[in-house]
Image (cartoon, helix red, strand yellow):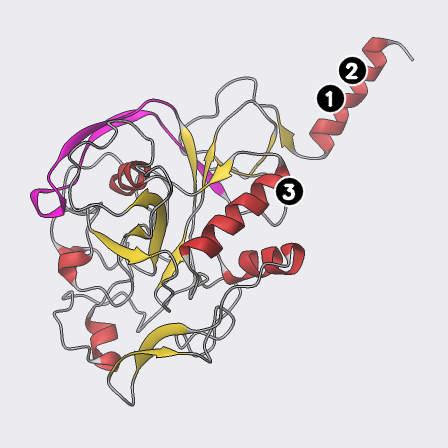
Amino acid sequence: MTWRTAAMGLLLLGAATGLQATDAPRAPGTTFRDCETCPAMVVIPAGSFVMGTPAEGGTLVIQIPHAFALGRNEVTRGEFAHFIADSGHEPRPGCRNWDPVLARFNDDAQRNWQSPATPVEPMDDHPVTCVTFVDARAYVEWLARETGERYRLPSEAEWEYAARGGTTTLRPWGDAPEDGCEFANTYDVTADAVYRLGWPHAGCRDGFADLARVGLLQPNSFNLHDMIGNVQEWVQDCATNSYVGRPRDARAWEWQGGCERRIQRGGSWLTPPDGSRSAYRVAASEGDRSDDTGFRIAKDLDQRAVRDEGR
C-alpha cells in the first residue's frame, strides 16, 4: 500500500465516522460532541465585557483572550449517571429541598441526585441536581481522562460572558424580568401558583412549576440554553465579596491551598426576579447540595477532531 492510498483511506474513514478535522478554528456558535455520551458543547468566541454590577461586588472590564467551549445545556441526569456507572464515584447522600409539609427548605438525608424532591418524576434529560462542587469537579476530571480533552468547570468570568451573549442589559433578553419566560425557567406565575414561596415572582408564565428538562426554552445569542434559571450552576472560582484584585481575563480566581466556599451562578426555578440576572452570584460551601443546584461544563479548545452536531 502506498502512502497516498493509506492517506485516502484515513480521509474516507474520517468522513464515514462523521468526524470534523479542526485544523481551522471552529466558528462561534458551532455545536459539537467529543463522544456519544458527552455533553453537547458550543464554541464561545473571544471578546471582552463589563463583568458584574454595583450590587455584585462592583464592575470590571474582562478580556476573554481565546475562544472556548461551554455546555449547550446543564449536565443532565443521564450524563451524570453514565459517569457514576463508569467511574465508581459515590456522591454523599442528603439534599436540601423545599418541603411542602413544613413549608420551608429542609435537609433530607434520604434524598440524593437519584431521588431529588423536585421534579416528582425526574427524567434523564432533566439537569442533575443535589450535587456538590466536589461531584461536579469529579465529573469533569473523569470526562477529561476518558476523552483526552481539556474539560473543566467554567470560570466565573467565562460564565457571565457566555450568559450575557454580547448584551449589556441586566438579562440576556433585556432588563425586564417579565419578558424572559421564553428564555428562562425562574420563579414565575406558574411556580407561584404551586409553591407559594413567599417572595416576588416574574409576571409571566414559563410553563414550569419547578425543574424543566434541558433545552426546552429559547437559547441566548450564543446558542446556550438555561443560562438563567432552571438550576444554579457551580463555577470554579472561590467565593469573594468583591472583584477587587481578581484576574482581568478568563481565569478562575482561586486561592493557594484551595477554598471552602465556591460561587454559583444563574439562579434557578425558584429564584425571584431580582436574582434572575446575568451578574447574579451566590456563595456556597463546596459540600453544599440542593435540588435546585447543578452545573455546566467548559472545555479549552485545541486542534483535535470532534463530532460535528451542526448549529
Q: Which mark is residue 7?
A: 2
Residue pictured at 51% horizontal, 62% vertical: 77
Tally of numbered discs: 3
CB contact under 8 Å: marks 2 and 1: yes
Q: Nearer the viewer, residue 153 or 226?
A: 153
Using the rendered view, name the quadrant where residue 230 is placed: bottom left
Does the stretch in magenta take in 58?
A: yes
Residue tagged 1: 11
Using the rendered view, name the quadrant where residue 162 is placed: top left
Question: Whole-Å distance between the Cαs marked 3 and 1?
Answer: 24 Å
Q: Looking at the image, is 306 positioned above or below residue 178?
A: above
Question: Whole-Å distance between the Cαs marked 2 and 1?
Answer: 6 Å
Q: Nearer the viewer, mark 3 or mark 1?
A: 3
> Residue lying farthest bottom?
101
CB contact under 8 Å: marks 2 and 3: no
Relative horizontal placement of residue 307, taking residue 67 as reference (left or right): right
Q: Looking at the image, is 140 positioned above or below residue 196?
A: above
Whole-percent x, y for residue 66 in the image: 38, 23
Of the image marks 2 and 3, the number of the one nearer the N terminus: 2
> Residue lying farthest left?
54
Question: Of helix, strand and loop, which one carries label 3?
Answer: helix
Whole-percent x, y for residue 74 in the image: 42, 53
Inspect the image, locate mark 1, and give the three-letter code of the amino acid beneath it. Leu
Q: Looking at the image, is 120 positioned above or below residue 261?
A: below
Inspect the image, locate mark 2, and give the three-letter code of the amino acid beneath it. Ala
Q: Which mark is residue 146?
A: 3
Whole-percent x, y for residue 15 in the image: 70, 28
